[in-house]
C-alpha cells in the first residue's frame, strides 16, 4: 500500500502545519479531565437511576447531598435534587410507555 503524502501547497495542509508548529491542540488540564469524567459518570448514573435499587438510590442521594458548595444550604440542595430526580423519573416513565401497548 502506497500512502500519499499531503500536498504542502494545499492551504489547509499549510494552515494545519502552522497550527501544529505553534503548539497545536492543547491537552486538557487535570481539572477539565476530572470534570468531563464526573459529567459522564453522573449522566450514566442518571440514565440508570430508575433501575437502581431504592437503597442504592438513597445512598447516592445522601452522598451527593453532602457534596454541597461552601455556604450553601444542604436542605435546599436536597430539595432541588429531589425535584430534579422526580421530574426525571416521570419523564423516563413517560418515554418508556411509548409504543409499548401491544
Image (cartoon, grey):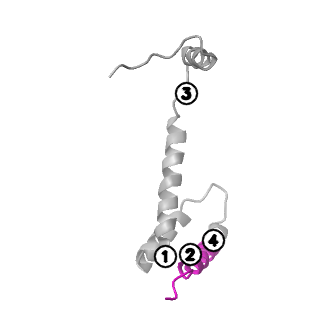
**Mark pair 3, 4: CA separation:** 35 Å
Q: Is residue 3 highlighted in magenta?
A: no
- Considering depth in this image, is 19 or 85 the residue closer to the camera? 19
Q: Quadrant of the N terminus?
A: top left
**Magenta stretch, residue numbers:** 79-102
Q: What residue is shown at x 43% (from left), y 18% (from top)? A: 4
Relative height, residue 95 to residue 27 (above, below): below
Mark toward the start of the polypeptide (1 vs 3) = 3
Secondary structure mostly seen in the magenta stretch: helix
Q: Point out which mark residue 26 bears.
A: 3
Q: Residue at x 54, y 18 (%)?
A: 20
Looking at the image, do the residues carrying marks 1 and 3 touch, with CB atoms under 8 Å apart? no
Residue farthest toward the bottom in the current orientation of the protein: 102
> Which residue is tagged 1?
50
The span from disc 1 to disc 4 (Cα, nearest Å) is 13 Å
**Residue 51 position within the rendered picture, expressed as x and y whole percent measured from the top left:** 44, 75
Give the residue pinned by disc 4: 84
For label 3, the crowd category at 10 Å Cα-Cα, with few meaning under 14, some 14 to 19 and many 20 or more, is few
Sequence order check: which comes first, mark 4 or mark 2?
4
Compared to residue 67, the image places residue 54 above or below, namely: below
Relative horizontal placement of residue 80, taking residue 26 as reference (left or right):
right
Looking at the image, do the residues carrying marks 1 and 2 touch, with CB atoms under 8 Å apart?
yes
Whether pointer 3 and pointer 4 mark residues with C-beta atoms closer than 8 Å, the reply is no
Tell me where residue 2 appears, x and y as whole percent.
Answer: 35, 19
Tell me whether circle 1 and circle 4 mark residues in contact (CB < 8 Å). no
Give the secondary structure at mark 3: loop
- Magenta-span inclusion, residue 82: yes
94 or 7: which is nearer to us? 7
Image depth: mark 3 or mark 4 in front: 3
Residue holding disc 2: 92
Q: Residues within 10 Å of mark 1 (few under 14, many from 20)?
A: some
Amino acid at each position: 500500500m502506497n500512502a500519499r503524502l499531503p500536498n504542502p501547497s494545499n492551504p489547509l495542509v499549510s494552515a494545519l502545519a502552522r497550527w501544529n508548529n505553534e503548539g497545536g491542540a492543547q491537552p486538557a488540564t487535570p481539572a477539565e479531565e476530572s470534570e468531563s469524567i464526573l459529567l459522564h459518570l453522573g449522566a450514566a448514573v442518571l440514565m440508570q437511576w430508575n433501575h437502581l435499587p431504592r437503597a442504592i438510590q438513597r445512598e447516592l442521594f445522601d452522598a451527593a447531598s453532602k457534596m454541597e458548595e461552601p455556604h450553601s444550604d444542604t436542605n435546599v440542595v436536597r430539595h432541588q435534587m429531589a425535584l430534579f430526580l422526580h421530574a426525571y423519573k416521570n419523564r423516563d416513565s413517560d418515554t418508556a410507555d411509548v409504543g409499548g401497548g401491544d
